[in-house]
Amino acid sequence: MRVKETKMVESAYWMTRRSLVGLMAAAALGVPAAVAFADDTMVVVHKDPNCGCCSSWVQHLRDAGFAVRVEEAADLKTVRARLGIPATLAACHTAEVAGYMLEGHVPAEAVRRLLSERPKAKGIAVPGMPIGSPGMEGGQPQSFTVVLFGPDGSRPFMRFIGKQSVG
C-alpha cells in the first residue's frame, strides 16, 4: 500500500492554538472575529534605523497585541513610492498590514478598526508628527485626524486627541 504525500498550504491566517483560544474568548465577549485576528496579523514596519519615535510607535503596536517585524530603511521616500503612499500624507515611518498601508503615528485602535471593517482603501495615515500620538508622547497632546486614503482620494477615518479616540 502506497501512502499519499500531502503538502500543507501556507496561509497568512494560519490558526494557532493561541489564536483559536483568543478567537473563542473574543466570541464569548462579543468581539468581531476580524478584531480578534488582529493580534495574529503581522505588521511590517519600514523605519529609519536611528529614529526613536518610530521605535516607540512599534512598541505601542506590540503593547496593543500586534506582531511586528521591523525593516530598517535609510531611504523611506523610495519605500513610500513603491507602496503608493501619497507624498501629502508622508510622515515618519511606513507599515504594511493585511494588504493595507499605515503611514505615520497611527494609533493601534485605528489599525484594529481598519482590519475589522476592511474598507476599500489603500490604507490609513497620520500626516506629520502630532504631539501625543503613539510614539510622540510628551507635552500637551494635539488633536489629529487619521486619514483613510486610496484610489478614490482621502477622507477622515477617526479623530484622536493624543491616544484617545474622539470620534
Image (cartoon, rainbow, N blue to C red):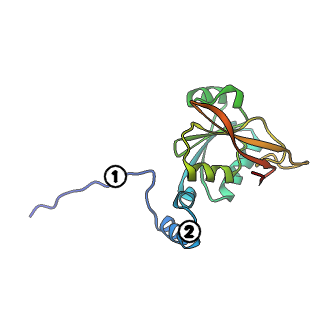
Nearer the observer, 5 or 85: 85
Q: Which residue is mark 2?
A: 26
Q: Relative to the observer, which residue lies in front, 4 or 104? A: 104
At label 2, the amino acid type is Ala
Please identify, in this view, whether the residue under mark 2 or under mark 1 is nearer the observer. Answer: 2
- Looking at the image, residue 136 lies above or below residue 74: below
**For the residues marked 2 and 1, what is the alpha-carbon distance in whole angstroms?**
26 Å
Horizontal and vertical percent for residue 72? 64, 38
- As shown in the figure, which amino acid type bears the numbered disc 1? Val
Please report the residue visible at 65 percent of the width from the left and 28 percent of the height from the top.
86
Residue appearing at x 56%, y 68% in the figure? 26
- Percent across and percent down for residue 11 are 41, 51
Q: Quadrant of residue 104?
A: top right
* Figure quadrant of residue 147: top right
Q: At 52% across and 46% down in the image, what residue appears? A: 98
The residue wearing badge 1 is 9
Instruction: Say few, some or many: other residues with alpha carbon within 10 Å of mark 2 (under 14 / 14 to 19 / 20 or more).
Output: some
Which sits in the foreground, 87 or 33? Answer: 33
Q: Quadrant of the N terminus?
A: bottom left
